[in-house]
Amino acid sequence: MTDRYCVLGNPVAHSRSPAIHAQFAAQCGQDMGYEAVLAPLNGFAVTVAQFIAAGGKGANVTVPFKEEAFRLSTRRSARAERAGAVNTLVFGADEIFGDNTDGAGLVRDIEANRGIALAGKRILLLGAGGAARGALAPLLECRPAGLAIANRTADKAAALAAGFADLAAVDAGNYADFAGRTFDVVINATSASLAGAALPLPAGLFAPDSLAYDMMYGKGETPFLALARAQGAARRADGLGMLVEQAAEAFLVWRGVRPDTAPVLAALRAQIAA
Ligand code: NDP
């Protein structure tokens, strides 16, 4: 019988995950189906229970249910515990296992796809929401020279940094606090680009050979990447690679095989550009 998986979200019709996983499954010869399932805003747990009852083996979870998926999980990976959110569920006979592959996807996109080793780099993470939190531990595991968090609301950056103090000393502040500092990798984990807004970044943040990475993606250049280009960031990447890599990591968790992401990412990029 074909194994069933899905992505749960609200909204979810726009999700690229069904197309990504269909390509992974075909490439790896896995007998599985993957669909998008719209969960009512007040009915996430019920929707999960229905999917399990219908024979579902696992699910990805997207906005706005990642924290609820965390609470629903009866067992969690260490990286999910650190992230405080779950984007990958595995339905076992007597448990719901929760994992988080977002941070691993980000790191893999930067290191494997872009060829930039994060060890020894000065990293600035912009934003202090769920995406920033999920990225922190995987970034710190790469042993950067330093990691700082800048956020519109400085208190949230400070609280996030404090929560990871056992792993490393993490600087925190608002954007203006980082005037005069320079970074090798600047990652936008805010949702400002969604609203088409540019961040009020002080000039001089980007080292000449730096990477500007926007977790957001879409047709054309995001406001953050346009700003980074204007401020001299030599290398710029959007979050499409992170999306495909977090999916590949989830596929590995479910099926025990890591798909080749390059052709899937290329096809998706061509589709979005069209
Ligand atoms: P949250 O709502 O949890 O966090 C939002 C963050 O953005 C906060 O730090 C908030 O600052 C900041 N922010 C929002 N609007 C503005 C603005 N106009 N100016 C400055 N700062 C702003 O969102 P998430 O962390 O879940 O998601 C963040 C982004 O990451 C989204 O764009 C999402 O699409 C992307 N993402 C991409 C993934 C991928 O696979 N490529 C995976 C996961 C997320 P404050 O605290 O001051 O309110």
Image: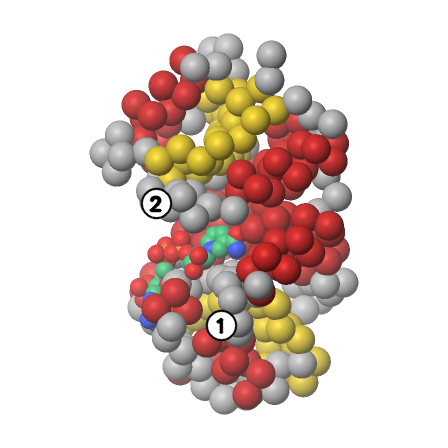
Q: Could you tell me which residue is drawn at 30 percent across and 23 percent down?
A: 46
Q: Secondary structure at mark 1?
A: loop
* Disc 1 to disc 2, C-alpha distance: 22 Å
Q: Is residue 86 above or below residue 162?
A: above
Numbered tag placed on residue 11 in the rendering: 2
> Would residue 210 be visible to someone looking at this image?
yes
Q: Secondary structure at mark 2?
A: loop
Q: Could you tell me which residue is drawn at 61 percent across and 68 percent down?
A: 237
CA neighbours of label 2 inside 10 A, class few (<14), some (14 to 19), many (20+):
some
> Which percent across, then down, holds residue 213?
57, 67
> Which percent across, then down, holds residue 16?
52, 47
Taking the image as shown, residue 50 lies to the left or right of residue 134, namely: left
CA neighbours of label 1 inside 10 A, class few (<14), some (14 to 19), many (20+):
many
Q: Which residue is the site of mark 1? A: 222
Q: How many numbered circles are shown?
A: 2
> Which percent across, then down, holds residue 118?
69, 62
Amino acid at the residue labelled 2: Pro
> Which percent across, then down, holds residue 261?
71, 47
Q: Are marks 1 and 2 in contact (CB under 8 Å)?
A: no
Numbered tag placed on residue 246 in the rendering: none
Amino acid at the residue labelled 1: Thr
Q: Is residue 134 above or below residue 195?
A: above
Residue that sits furthest to the front in the current view? 274
Quadrant containing the N terminus is: top right
Q: Could you tell me which residue is drawn at 48 percent across and 39 percent down?
A: 87
